Amino acid sequence: MQNKIKIIVDDKIPFIRNIFEPCAEVLYLPPVQITQDMVADADALVIRTRTKCDERLLSGSSVRFIGTATIGTDHIDIPYCEGQGITWKNAPGCNAESVAQYVSSVLARFSIRDGFKLHDKTIGIVGVGHVGSRVEQVCRILGMKVLLNDPLREEAEGSGLFVSLQEIERECDIISFHTPLTYTGNFPSFHLADDVFFSRLRKRPIIINAARGEVVDTCALLNAFDEKLINDAVIDCWEGEPNIDLRLLDRVYVATPHIAGYSADGKANATRTMIDELARFFGFSLSSQIKVPVPDDTVIDLAGVLDFRIENALLSTYDPMSDSCKLKITPCDFEKLRGNYGLRRESRAYTIRGFKDGEKGVLRELGFCLENNW
């Protein structure tokens, strides 16, 4: 009888326990324990961004497959893995809706705090892949003017949909980053928002980084605060995380521990993808059916809400200030807050009552259910 393969799984990946066990020996470990010695006799790894898959980890191992339950791949040394014949898979688009929920909730917070209507604002989206495209859709549903910057897509598709970064810098009230982290090529994203970028801003925008920490130069962002080149900032992804810059933590309005894509729905999508990819690679027959827990209260009542009604509906599904307060109080718990992140459902899990006729289209497009199937 052939021995079962051995799979090492990041123990913070949800909905994955007891899935592979019929076909494999499975070891669940925190990222700090996924070391060269531990993976030496493993056939497969299922990981997140905290595990750097490179020669230092994989040399001499029997690993044939790496699945990362994330959209990003900058923690995987792709040339090394491919040179060693190691197959790798990620989960593109798995958390696009989750990040869009995060961004729309952040926008709702600013709208209420500063007393502006979102339809009066222009947002620039830098990086228009799976995530940026969904953020674009949600912002358009909210009535915002949207400018898109993605030089890689522009090179492939033409300039009809896209504008230059310089136009984003000139025209936008809000700039939201959704690029992968790259260091080489024609359009590297490392420190894309640097001193030059901030010096060219014309409307003192709000800056949102829900991409990778190193896309925004921390020192340049702090200088932009000092020189009043920006209105405010939202940082979910940090340079050097989990050892984040406490000066920046103190300055930004919303500070979260890299959880923009951490809705339960997004996590379930990523886990399903990893189950399917690993089963396909090894020829297993596995079920990727996952039931996501239901929120305690699934009804949002807008009947008593006088103003910012759509914004309040968004914040009823997720209010980023809760996560921000936790991180600002205990920044040393960055990894704990991220690794033990609680239940957060997307809009499809909620039913709206007390809506007005003119709001039905927007609420439905945002994914909400409407009471009595309106």
Image (cartoon, grey):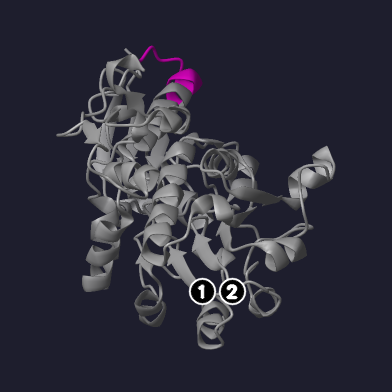
Depth check: give the residue in front, 247 or 202.
202
Quadrant position of residue 70: top left
Q: What separation in Å lies between label 2 and label 1 (alpha carbons)? A: 5 Å
Tell whether 347 sits left or right of 303.
right
Residue 18: percent from left, percent from top: 23, 25
Q: Amino acid at mark 1?
A: Asn
Depth check: give the residue in front, 339 or 324.
324
Tell whether 19 sits left or right of 295.
right
Residue 96: percent from left, percent from top: 49, 39
206 in the magenta segment? no
Depth check: give the residue in front, 172 or 306.
306
Residue depicted at x 54% and y 42%:
131
According to the image, label 1 marks what residue?
A: 231
Residue depicted at x 57% and y 56%:
121
Eyeballing the image, is 37 above or below 70?
below
279 in the magenta segment? yes
Q: Amino acid at mark 2?
A: Arg
Tell whether 270 sits left or right of 169.
left
Whether residue 176 is visible to the viewer of this picture, yes or no, is yes
Q: Quadrant of the C terminus?
A: top left
Quadrant position of residue 230: bottom right
Residue depicted at x 38% and y 69%:
253
According to the image, label 2 marks what residue?
A: 204
Q: Which residues are magenta?
A: 278-287
Q: Residues within 10 Å of mark 2 (few under 14, many from 20)?
A: many
